[in-house]
Image (cartoon, grey):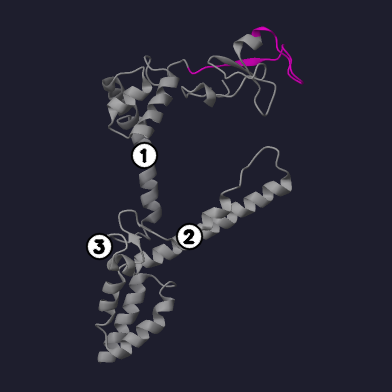
Amino acid sequence: MDRLGSFSNDPSDKPPCRGCSSYLMEPYIKCAECGPPPFFLCLQCFTRGFEYKKHQSDHTYEIMTSDFPVLDPSWTAQEEMALLEAVMDCGFGNWQDVANQMCTKTKEECEKHYMKHFINNPLFASTLLNLKQAEEAKTADTAIPFHSTDDPPRPTFDSLLSRDMAGYMPARADFIEEFDNYAEWDLRDIDFVEDDSDILHALKMAVVDIYHSRLKERQRRKKIIRDHGLINLRKFQLMERRYPKEVQDLYETMRRFARIVGPVEHDKFIESHALAFEL
């Protein structure tokens, strides 16, 4: 088969029949000679020999169905996809809710099948291990060891501390108002359709590229704030005051260059000048 049909239980999620425009129910027919876009027919239109434009009734065809086993003889491909979708919707471990959404399997069957084929499957485990080893090898020379630090305060909304922290929400690692906070507004009315001209499509893609660049700048600024410990501004200012006034002036002057060098290198630079001043 070229591909499986839609696995959703909602008929409206499946493509319509090109003959009668009704929602397709498995099994249905896909013409192997027409497309793109794919040419689908329900069984009723197929048996009537429906023809449309270039599609002829004697074209080769494929039967689209998901009623066959994949990992377990007692589970069809449709049930496999329904299980993955239910776990995604209900959350891992909520097996009763998963079974209720699937309707065809019990809580115990869902848990046993998922754990056996998707968690404890040696094939998947070895694949994940290879990916992990490849990632570790790639970052072995550049990895920075993790050192635990003070948990950032979690002030109530609109409190004095919250304002000092610029509305930072530690549990989400986000700010109440982000840099370039309305960047998403430019995408509100963009919709990619098949009838778009090449110029219009290129313009829409340019807007998306601009949005991506604005997101990258937002993430870059947030990374600088987190890496240099600037979230809790009051604590940062107290640490700054431990230096003599001459070093504080240097700190203020060199702050603009902190984004160029890393936090460790920047602190070493300031500390070295503080020691030189003491000498």
User: Which of labels 3 and 1 is toward the front?
Assistant: 3
The circle drawn on residue 128 is 1
Q: Which percent across, then down, holds residue 4?
A: 53, 23
| Residue drawn where x is 26% and y is 73% of the image | 235
Whole-number angstrom distance, CA of label 1 to CA of label 2: 37 Å
Q: Along the line of sight, which residue is nearer the eye, 70 or 96?
A: 96
Helix, strand or loop for disc 3: loop
**Which range of residues does the magenta coloring cover?**
47-66
| Residue drawn where x is 36% and y is 86% of the image | 250
Helix, strand or loop for disc 2: loop
User: Which of labels 1 and 2 is toward the front?
Assistant: 2
Q: Is residue 54 above or below residue 85?
A: above
Quarter of the view holding residue 60 = top right
| SS majority, magenta | loop
Mark 3 and mark 2 lie on one chain; the one further toward the N terminus is 3
Pick the quarter of the image with the N terminus.
Answer: top right
Mark 3 and mark 1 lie on one chain; the one further toward the N terminus is 1
Q: Which residue is mark 3?
A: 153
Q: Along the line of sight, which residue is nearer the eye, 197 or 131?
A: 197
Q: Amino acid at mark 1?
A: Leu
Pick the quarter of the image with the C terminus.
Answer: bottom left
Q: Amino acid at mark 3?
A: Pro
Mark 1 is surrounded, within 10 Å at the Cα level, by few (under 14), some (14 to 19) or many (20 or more) other residues, namely few
Residue ranking furthest to the top: 47
Whole-number angstrom distance, CA of label 3 to CA of label 2: 23 Å
Q: Is residue 140 above or below residue 29?
A: below
